[in-house]
Image (cartoon, rainbow, N blue to C red):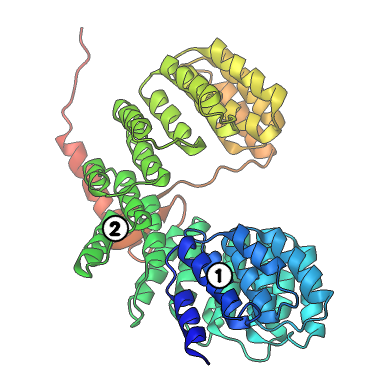
Amino acid sequence: MSSCTKRCLILLEKCKNMKHLKQAHALVFTTGLENNTFALSRVLAFCSNPHKGSLTYACKVFDHIPHPTICICNTIFKAFILNGKFTSTIHVFTKVVVQNGLSPDNYTIPYVLKSCAALQSCSLGKMVHGYSSKSGLGFDIFVGNSLMAMYSVCGDMVGARQVFDEIPSLSVVSWTVMISGYARRGDVDLARFFFDEAPEKDRGVWGAMISGYVQNNCFKEGLYLFHLMQLTDIVLDESIFVSILSACAHMGALDIGIWIHRCLNQARLPLSIRLSTSLLDMYAKCGQLKLAKTLFDLMPKRDIVCWNAMISGMAMHGNGTSALELFTDMEKAGIEPDDITFIAVFTACSYSGMAYEGLRLLDKMCSTYKIEPKSEHYSCIVDLLSRAGLFEEAMTVIRRITSSSNGSQETLAWRAFLSACCNHGQAQLAELAAERLLQLENHSGVYVLLSNLYTAYGKHSDARWVRDMMKSKGADKAPGCSSVEIDGVLSEFIAGEKVHPQLEEIHLVLKKMHMQLDLNTPITRPKV
């Protein structure tokens, strides 16, 4: 290799921006390396960087290569994927690789399958599956894992399982993909089966199962698995911390959340925006708004998810004015709100009795930010109008939903309206809302709300009639559930169940408490 050639390749390796890249590329031509595979792949690789490269330039370079090798094709596929051009991957694969008879390797097929998954095209994925089998790559572990990932992302776990069973030598990635796939579909039992059967459990396998539990609202199970993971020597990563903090937020497990925060501080791990947002969301949902706000103020950078978490936390705990002030600060900071932001803002207005402010913000959402209202937004608006006693206005919004949306959106709005009617003692409107709701769904909450309203007004026969109807329709009420955290251990109690190992001791303590309360309660006499 000549000194000039070496200098050219070194320049390609040291490029920092497109100006440098173009200079180095010009040198490629002057040194006669315009058809050198390594030099061209370095040019394409630099251009693939979404932040400092140029996909347009990469495509021009690729189009001028008369006979691209499979290595060159793989490099342009990677560039397409990094820049979100998944259709381009399929097009080049078909026109250049397949039609020209190039032999794909175990990099080519995974790139193409990743594009199929991103496009949610299982049919294309199946065609690539058949092509890879004919090319002799059907049993390759990298191709197999990519096939499983494609099928699971597209919701075809039968196809993923078939590939899993056919691969002669599985890796931990194989087990992780299957666990994530079943969890994504909501089948946590099968996900747990694969977790238990995995011969080797690395951080990815543990993380996939913990995340799967949390994604499916099995927060207690996720926390329990986290405790088991602590007994191993596996080092936790950011994704696991985020999943556990989410479980803590939903379960109100503040002690565990604080412990995780201390672990992060002791390990001196830099708090990313994602991790900081998870921490402040946990503190906010556990009622520790001051801690959440302190963490929020200390963040050097904040994205929209972070702002939404802080606004939602304030709204949830009745700090409507503070939530709206934070929303204004967000706008001043140049952060554009999204649909989730406005759900939080409407909730804040609802809890604070600011109905007309909520309507003003609805108009701003539509006119200024061009966000199309969803069912959640309409439900919030119906709720805030109903809470303020503006039932006619709420009915107007519901009519708008009825004429322009599907049944599920209408159901959410009627639920909010029924709840507010019951709270305000609007029996006739409540009956109207209940009648419409029962046409849309057979939900126990409708019967319970209406029965409680009749009972409150002394209409006990009507209340019994509603309860009887509830039983005859098979709309059983889900049993109440509560949990308590003591020394980092969560205990859950479900109404009617008698499975807790310390149930007798708990009943004895409760009995003593009731007796003590009875002794300390003063006897009051009615005024004459």
Q: SS of the residue at dot 1?
A: helix
**Residue shown at 38% from the left, 38% from the top:** 312
Residue 370 placement, left or right of 304: right
**Residue 453 in view:** no
Compared to residue 143, the image places residue 181 above or below, namely above
* Cα gap from disc 2 to disc 1, whole angstroms: 56 Å
**Residue that extends furthest to the top in the rendered view of this protein:** 528
Amino acid type assigned to the residue bearing label 1 in the image: Ala
Amino acid type assigned to the residue bearing label 2 in the image: Gly
**Residue that extends furthest to the right in the rendered view of this protein:** 99
**Residue shown at 41% from the left, 18% from the top:** 357
Q: Which numbered marker is on residue 257?
A: 2
**Residue that extends furthest to the front in the rendered view of this protein:** 30
Residue 270 placement, left or right of 337: left
The spot of residue 202 in percent (x, y) is: 45, 81
**Residue situated in front as seen by the camera: 18 or 502:** 18
Compared to residue 242, the image places residue 454 above or below, namely above
Q: Quadrant of the C terminus?
A: top left
- Tally the numbered discs: 2
Q: SS of the residue at dot 2?
A: helix
2 vs 1, front mark:
1
**Residue situated in front as seen by the camera: 147 or 98:** 98
Q: Which numbered marker is on residue 26?
A: 1
Mark with earlier residue (2, 1): 1
